[in-house]
Amino acid sequence: MSKVLITGVAGFIGSSIARALLAEGAEVRGLDNLSTGKLENIEQIRNGIDFRHGDVQDAVAVADACKGVDYVFHEAAIPSVPVSVADPVGTNGPNLIGTLQVLEAARQAGVKRVVYAASSAAYGDSPELPKREDMAPAPLSAYAVQKLTGEYYLTSYAKMYGLETVSLRYFNIFGPRQDPTSQYSGVLARFISQMLAGTKPTIFGDGSTSRDFTYIDNVVSANLLAAKSGSHVAGKVFNVATGTSVTLLEAYEEVRRITGYAGDLDFKPERVGDIKHSVADISLARKELGYGVVADFAAGLEETIAWYRTQTVAAV
C-alpha cells in the first residue's frame, strides 16, 4: 500500500491498523499528540514507524506529516460521548478542526485517499433498527455532531476537490490494547478490568441497552478494504459492525462466565447522551467494500480477555 499516515497512531485503533499495514509491507508514518494514545501501544512496532509527536489541529505538523503519503487513516479524536457532553467546545478542536486540517493537508499533498473514523453516534436514538447509511442522521451529543460534520467535510472534499475519501461509522469497538482506565474506553474494557480485579462492575441504566459490539479485527479489515477499494467508494459512508445486537446485561454475563467473576453488579442512572439501542445493517459495506465479519462478539471477547489476563490491569 506504499506510504501511509495514521493519525492517532498510538491509540487503540490506530496502533492496530499500524500493525496490519506493517504486516502488508507498507511504509507507516504516525502522528499523535499522546493526549489519549500511549507509546506502549506501538512499542513493539516503534522501529517500523516514522513517528511524529504532533497535534492534528496544528496545520504545520499535519502538512509535514502528509508529505509524500499515498493514504491517510484519520483515527485521531477524543472518542467519548460523556466527555463531549461535559466539554463540547474543548472536544470540537480535536474532533472537527483536526479533521479539516487533515483533509486540507491531504489535498495539498496530493494524497490518494483519506479513510476517516466516523461514528455510529450519527444515528442518534432513532427507534428504527438496524441502522442504515441512508437513514437521516439524528446526532444527540457534541461528539456525534462533530463526527457527523467530519463526514460532511469528507464528502465535500471528494466532490469539490476530487480527494477520494471514505467514512467508516464504527460501532462500539473493543479488543486488546483498549485502556480500561481511560475515560474514553467502552463498557467492555471496564467490565473486563473490573471483573478480573474482583471489583463490582457498573451498568448505567437497567442493562437492557443494546449495542453492536465490534471486535477490533473487523475494524482493521474495514480500514484496509476502504483504502484498497475502487474509486466507486469515494465520498461514501459505510457502517463497520457485526450486524448483531447484544444487551449490556448479556455482555456482562458473558464476561462474567469467561472471567469467573462471582461478585455483584452495580446499577446507576442512565447517562445524558447515551443511546438506548444500536445495531448496524452492514450490507452496503459487504457489497461495495467486500467487508465481512472476521471475528464475532464471542470470539472477540475470548481473545480480548485472554490479552487482558496478560496485563497488569487496574480496576476502574
Image (cartoon, rainbow, N blue to C red):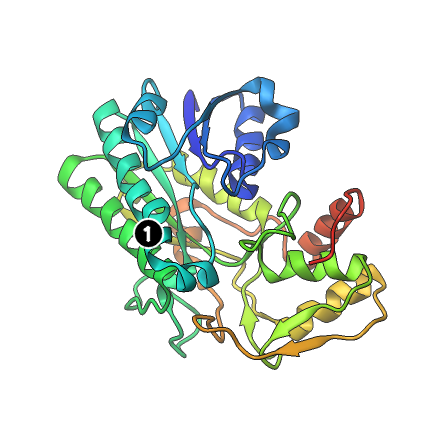
Q: Amino acid at mark 1?
A: Asn
> In front here: 272 or 239?
272
In x, y percent, where is residue 306?
A: 78, 48
Secondary element under disc 1, as helix, strand or loop, is helix
For this rendering, which residue is in front, 68 or 51? 51
Residue 125 locus on image (x, y percent)? 40, 74
Position above or below: 255 against 306? below
- Residue at 85%, 63% (x, y): give it: 260
Image quarter for residue 115? top left
Q: Is 315 on the left or on the right of 18, as rendered?
A: right
Q: On screen, 94 above or below 261?
A: above
Mark 1, Cα crowd under 10 Å, few <14 / some 14-19 / many 20+, is some
Q: Is residue 7 left or right of residue 157?
A: right
Q: Position of residue 159 (x, y in %)?
A: 17, 43
Locate residue 196 relative to residue 181 in the image: left or right. Answer: right
Against 30, residue 197 (above or below) is below
In percent of width and height, residue 293 lies at: 56, 52
Residue at 61% of width from left, 35% of height from top? Answer: 41
Q: Residue at x 54, y 67 (%)?
A: 211
- Work out which quarter of the rendered image holds the C terminus and state it: bottom right
Give the residue at the far left of this rendering.
160
Q: Is residue 292 above or below residue 19?
A: below
- Count the marks: 1
Location of the N terminus by quadrant is top left
Please tell me which residue is depicted at 45% across the width and 41% down the height of the picture: 223
Residue furthest toward the bottom? 206
Q: Which residue is mark 1?
A: 92
